């Protein structure tokens, strides 16, 4: 897929969080956004998801400019699968309903097919015995897997994932990463914010490093990890790899 950011700015209460980002990525399947906490990664992902609007600038995805009016943004959002740091599951619905209802109501799936597809996904995530539980009855890892299953349930153009493994223990982290890797092998386009550097390095073909609201480096993952150029990226990688 292609991603083009032109003079992208985002401020909250006059505090700049994304600072004039210009970026043109021509051909990637899986993009990892990495960088220190508070740098603006989630804000950028939410803009790409059409959930927040830039203060200034433009976003083009696969050559198409992101809409600024609510109606078109709403249509655009329906074409994506998104998984965010906080799970955003509907608290009053069961795990199964959380997957099925959006399929039926927002994406016009027939209910029987939606239930079948949702059950397949839940089984794939070892969640079949939890399908009738509501979010407050699930562990963090289980909720995250439901959220990922929900994002995969629709035929999305691409996936946006914000730290999909942040609430998971190491074993489940590996499972979820293996799953994302499988999607990548199937050439599913995705953009992912992650602190899992091993995964970003091995599994994502392109990396964008964001710190303090700016893109300080970007490139093929092999280059980024083997020869970081800026002191900020060197420092970040040293810190994050120190205990691994
Ligand atoms: N809705 C908001 N209102 C005000 N400030 C916000 C809002 N969303 C984010 N921010 C601020 O913007 C900055 C960037 O936040 P963001 O969530 O994008 O960082 P991040 O890189 O995803 O960090 P982390 O790795 O901790 O998730 C932070 O200083 C945050 O406090
Ligand atoms: Mg974040």
Image: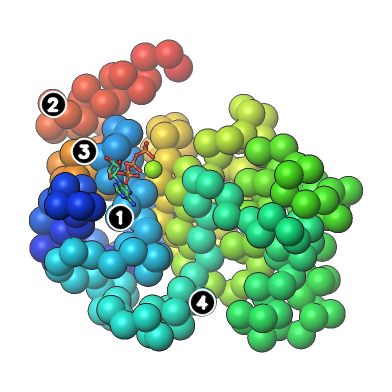
Q: Position of residue 136 (x, y in %)?
A: 73, 44
In the displayed structure image, the side of residue 169 where residue 217 appears, left or right: left
Q: Dividing the picture into quarters, in which one does residue 70 lie?
A: bottom left
| Secondary structure beneath label 2 | helix
Mark earlier in primary sequence (4, 2):
4
Q: Residue at x 32, y 34 (%)?
A: 37
Q: Position of residue 180 (x, y in %)?
A: 56, 50
Q: Is residue 23 visible?
A: no
Residue picked out by circle 4: 78
Q: Which mark is residue 101?
A: none
In the displayed structure image, the side of residue 206 where residue 124 appears, left or right: right
**Disc 2 crowd, CA 10 A, few/some/many (<14, 14-19, 20+):** few
Tell me the distance, in whole angstroms, between the alpha carbons under discs 4 and 1.
Answer: 18 Å
Mark 4 or 2: the one toward you:
4
Mark earlier in primary sequence (2, 1):
1
Viewer-nearest residue: 38 or 28: 38
Quadrant position of the C terminus in the picture: top left
Viewer-nearest residue: 57 or 186: 57
Ligand 1 closer than 8 Å to the CB at disc 1? yes
Mark 2 or 1: the one toward you:
1
Q: Is residue 127 above or below residue 238?
A: below
Q: Are marks 2 and 1 in contact (CB under 8 Å)?
A: no
Judged from this view, the residue extending furthest toward the front is 13
Residue picked out by circle 1: 44
Q: Are marks 3 and 1 in contact (CB under 8 Å)?
A: no
Q: Residue at x 18, y 39 (%)?
A: 212
Quadrant position of the N terminus in the picture: bottom left
Q: Is residue 216 above or below residue 239?
A: below
Residue picked out by circle 3: 211
């Amino acid at each position: 897929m292609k991603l083009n950011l032109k003079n992208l700015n985002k401020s909250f209460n006059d505090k700049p969080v994304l600072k004039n980002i210009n970026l043109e990525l021509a051909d990637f399947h899986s993009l990892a956004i990495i960088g220190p906490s508070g740098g603006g990664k989630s804000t950028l992902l939410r803009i790409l998801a059409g959930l927040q609007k830039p203060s200034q600038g433009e976003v083009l995805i696969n050559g198409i400019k992101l809409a600024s009016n609510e109606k078109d943004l709403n249509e655009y959002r329906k074409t994506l699968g998104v998984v965010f740091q906080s799970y955003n599951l509907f608290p009053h619905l069961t795990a199964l309903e959380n997957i099925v209802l959006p399929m039926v109501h927002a994406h016009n799936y027939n209910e029987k097919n939606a239930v079948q597809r949702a059950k397949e996904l839940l089984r794939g995530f070892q969640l079949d015995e939890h399908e009738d539980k509501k979010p407050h009855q699930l562990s963090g890892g289980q909720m995250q897997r439901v959220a990922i299953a929900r994002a995969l349930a629709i035929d999305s153009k691409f996936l946006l994932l914000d730290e999909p493994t942040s609430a998971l223990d190491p074993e489940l982290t590996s499972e979820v990463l293996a799953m994302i890797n499988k999607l990548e092998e199937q050439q599913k386009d995705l953009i992912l914010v992650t602190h899992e550097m091993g995964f970003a390095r091995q599994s994502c073909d392109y990396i964008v490093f964001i710190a303090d609201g700016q893109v300080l480096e970007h490139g093929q993952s092999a280059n980024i990890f083997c020869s970081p150029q800026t002191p900020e990226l060197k420092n970040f990688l040293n810190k994050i790899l120190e205990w691994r």
